[in-house]
């Protein structure tokens, strides 16, 4: 529920499960990332798939980002209509409906998309001409993750030349996301694998330059590789998203960012001495990867299982939470957890300060 | 997106990923369940957590159900405000806010909740008196799943007596859900375990009757145990939900119901001969249990991995899907997949016939 009437009251008064943001930790994360990037002179175009929240995108732009990144045309529409005017949709835009939507959006704000297919370049160009729009394009290079993206430098150059010649398209550079590197816990190994991927990306960028093509943007990275990529010569911008919130997965990496996002939940049953049932299940916190942690109670209250609307936790002897008691849960993955909600409850010292609409959820 | 303007057009014209319902399979499921239950003379109060869609709840009531079941107060509010006036919230209602909401709802429509805690009985009764409402109550008995619910018949009787005496509360019966039985593939084993659980539930009901308490409702079961429970003497109603949609998990059980729900997705990349990337990831289809199946292409196109907005599939040699081609995916779990969407696209022979709001999503 929206619950704007809860502003100014203690967060324990909201209905649970609910998404809660500690604004001080969040602001610290924004500032830490930006001051670091200012120092190493690399830009950030933060990924809005993490928050899907225009209020946050605007705070990121105010902090000094070059624009924002989106995962879908729907996200880009919501962000554009909320006043964000520089958006990279970091995915292939395929099919009549999606192309019509993204091209019409490009008549209103600056839009960049990525491509890995020659037919798609033709389709995008045809639509751009039909609607009189100009669409920025990055060519998508697979740098080791094995998802989308062309698989060789030769294909990259060939496709980029097609983009460069295509009316209505504006060749901007190259995109490559080292998704396979993000969660490697060992710092040395993560750095080594990250640099290997960055090397492929920069090699691609150089091949495009050598072919006389415009390469003003060389883009990649996530929160797990943000500094590895930011310090790699030739990369112009990083697309990290989760650094603003953090989660159980990124907590394992020893990053400087603070956990700002939690799911507030209520104990709804104490059926036995060593069991507590909370009201946050898979519909309120991502069931991905591993069970959520109970903030401040690690080792004492441990979630063992998620059902649809319940987390079943083991409770240590000596601890006796009562039905009605509240716990903050830390999700294993922030992005897929935010995607379950319509609102973020912004708190400062436990008092609700704002309720932000997650306007691009399922967009 | 809502996309009511797509009505009358082929489903391939909608943006993907999107939730699609085959209305003929759905109607068949409704009718099969109801005619079976009429025969064995047991009622159904279908679980609306599965669909969260008032349009579907009304069709279920028209088919002959005794009411509906909800998982949360928010779902019950949405259903009540959509004209549903007989609702069981099959979970403990704990905490000041949730209690205030459910009691106020009970002033408007007939509401039943479940309890497993004496303090909660006191709190519910106090609120019912304060607001002048009457709340129906089932006592929650654990029948082997190990989640909420009292753990013994003695506790059950003690708690039911407290409910019976509490002003504002109306003792209606006993609730016990054999969640641990639902997915047992072997039919004989599922029947054996189901009956064991049903036996505990009916024993509880008899103990309540023997103590002179009102036991008009003896409620349990899900789609996996619907007929086991429906034919067990003493059980008055079942709370199955998924039978209307089906999913990959329930398909393994040899049930008579048809798969009516799919997620329509688009091929967005063919980076290699044996790889297709689809646009339905963990934000568009549940990542629970196992990867989604590609309807009609089983064994030829196999999803190997879900990312946030992508399904990465292996493609057999001899198959050559192109970017833009559409596939219907079958989720491993229908309830948590529906929860990701705001709309269900209702189709008949591939033509969109209605777009139903999933009004109780995240409620």
Image (cartoon, coloured by chain):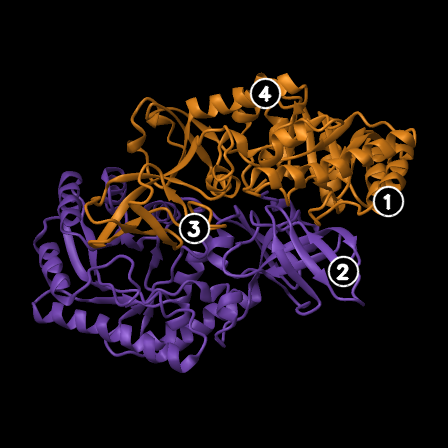
Chain colours: A orange, B purple
- Image position of B96 with respect to B162: above or below: above
Spatial CA span between label 1 and label 2: 17 Å
- SS at mark 3 in the image: loop
Q: Earlier in the sequence, mark 1 or mark 4?
A: 4
User: Is residue A73 left or right of B323 when viewed as pictured?
Assistant: left
In this rendering, which labeled residue sits more in front, label 3 or label 4? 4
Which residue is found at the position 51% from the left and 32% from the top? A255
Residue corresponding to mark 3: A282
- Picture quarter with the N terminus of chain A: top left
How many marks the image carries: the answer is 4
Q: Quadrant of residue A305?
A: bottom left
Observer-nearest residue: A316 or A280? A316
Spatial CA span between label 3 and label 4: 36 Å
Chain ID at mark 1: A
In this rendering, which labeled residue sits more in front, label 4 or label 2? 4
Question: Are marks 1 and 3 in one subunit?
Answer: yes
Q: Residues within 10 Å of mark 4 (few under 14, many from 20)?
A: few
In this rendering, which labeled residue sits more in front, label 3 or label 2? 2
Residue corresponding to mark 1: A155
Q: Position of residue A263 (x, y in %)?
A: 39, 39
- Image position of A185 with respect to B154: above or below: above
């Amino acid at each position: 529920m929206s619950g704007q009437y809860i502003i100014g009251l203690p967060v324990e008064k909201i209905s649970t499960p609910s998404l809660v943001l500690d604004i001080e930790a969040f602001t610290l994360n924004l500032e830490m990332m930006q001051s670091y990037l200012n120092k190493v002179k690399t830009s950030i175009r933060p990924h809005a798939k993490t928050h899907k929240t225009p209020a946050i995108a605007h705070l990121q732009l105010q902090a000094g980002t070059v624009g924002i990144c989106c995962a879908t045309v729907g996200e880009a529409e919501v962000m554009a209509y909320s006043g964000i005017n520089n958006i990279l949709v970091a995915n292939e835009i395929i099919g009549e409906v999606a192309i019509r939507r993204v091209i019409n959006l490009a008549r209103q704000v600056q839009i960049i998309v990525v491509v890995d297919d020659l037919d798609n370049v033709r389709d995008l160009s045809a639509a751009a001409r039909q609607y009189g729009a100009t669409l920025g394009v990055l060519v998508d290079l697979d740098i080791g993750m094995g998802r989308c993206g062309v698989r060789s430098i030769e294909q990259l150059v060939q496709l980029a030349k097609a983009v460069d010649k295509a009316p209505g398209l504006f060749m901007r550079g190259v995109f490559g996301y080292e998704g396979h590197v993000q969660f490697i816990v060992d710092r040395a190994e993560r750095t080594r694998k990250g640099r290997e991927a960055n090397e492929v990306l920069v090699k691609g960028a150089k091949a495009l330059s050598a072919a006389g093509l415009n390469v003003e943007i060389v883009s990649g990275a996530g929160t797990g590789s943000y500094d590895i990529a930011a310090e790699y010569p030739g990369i112009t911008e990083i697309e990290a998203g989760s650094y603003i919130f953090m989660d159980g997965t990124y907590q394992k990496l020893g990053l400087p960012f603070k956990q700002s996002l939690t799911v507030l939940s209520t104990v709804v049953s104490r059926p036995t001495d060593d069991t507590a049932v909370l009201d946050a299940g898979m519909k309120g916190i991502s069931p991905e990867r591993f069970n959520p942690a109970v903030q401040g109670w690690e080792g004492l209250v441990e979630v063992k299982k998620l059902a649809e609307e319940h987390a079943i936790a083991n409770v240590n002897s000596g601890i006796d939470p009562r039905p009605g008691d509240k716990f903050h849960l830390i999700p294993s993955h922030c992005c897929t957890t935010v995607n379950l909600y319509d609102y973020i409850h912004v708190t400062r010292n436990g008092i609700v300060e704002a309720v932000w609409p997650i306007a691009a959820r399922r967009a």
